Image (tube, rainbow, N blue to C red):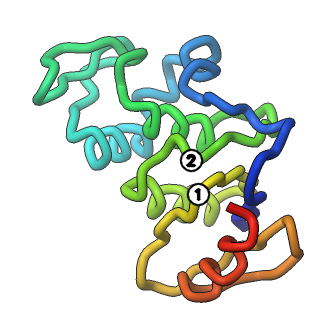
Amino acid sequence: MLRVYLGNMEQAIYHPPTYFDNQYEDEWITDNLSVEMIKDVDKSEVISSHLIDSPILGPISVKDISGGVKTLILMAFDSSDKVFNASVCGDNCAKWILRIAKNRDLTINLRHIMDFGKDEFELEILNTGDTVRNMDQFVRVAGEYV
């Protein structure tokens, strides 16, 4: 289940990419989910746990992937129960956030209105306790907090 806290959340990791650079584990990078996310969001190929092939930058370190992908990988694999600021992610990460939340309980912080797409989804707004199932409902609630 996806749970979202809207607006400033003091206990959230404000800049997940920095946290990622100091906490990630090699096996996270070569996991099929990470490989798919890196390919989709960054348009890059995972060569190994230490090397990514970017069509723009060429061979890069894992620490040079986008902040959005770093945050997604943390959401999928970090076991610390930290809440990550998902506003460092672009809307191209929204479908991955929903997918991750299907496999594990996930709480994120959003400081903007993320576009979760036209399809039905389910998330709980922690600020109000409301469950929303589409973008119209989400925007109505989120607009009050971000």
Q: Residue at x 19, y 23 (%)?
A: 53
Relative image position of residue 142 (x, y in whole percent): 68, 71
Tell me if residue 146 comes above or below residue 60 in the rendering.
below
Name the secondary structure under disc 1: loop
Tell me if residue 93 comes above or below residue 125 in the rendering.
above
Q: Amino acid at mark 2?
A: Ser
Mark seen at residue 112: 1
Q: Nearer the viewer, residue 141 or 13?
A: 141
Q: Quadrant of the N terminus?
A: bottom right
Relative image position of residue 79 (x, y in whole percent): 75, 34
Look at the numbered discs 2 and 1 and tell me whether their residues touch, using CB distance below 8 Å: yes
Q: Residue at x 35, y 18 (%)?
A: 64
Q: Residue at x 59, y 57 (%)?
A: 112
Residue 65: quarter of image: top left
Q: Which residue is mark 2?
A: 87
Mark seen at residue 96: none
Q: Is residue 102 left or right of residue 54?
A: right
Q: Nearer the viewer, residue 124 or 76?
A: 124
Tell me if residue 30 comes above or below residue 97 in the rendering.
above
Q: Residue at x 26, y 21 (%)?
A: 52
Tell me if residue 121 comes above or below residue 142 in the rendering.
below
Label 1, residues with CA under 10 Å away: few <14, some 14-19, many ≥20: some
Name the secondary structure under disc 2: helix
- Which badge, 2 or 1, comes first in the chain's sequence? 2
Residue 95: quarter of image: bottom left
Relative image position of residue 97 (x, y in whole percent): 54, 57
Label 2, residues with CA under 10 Å away: few <14, some 14-19, many ≥20: many
Q: Amino acid at mark 1?
A: His
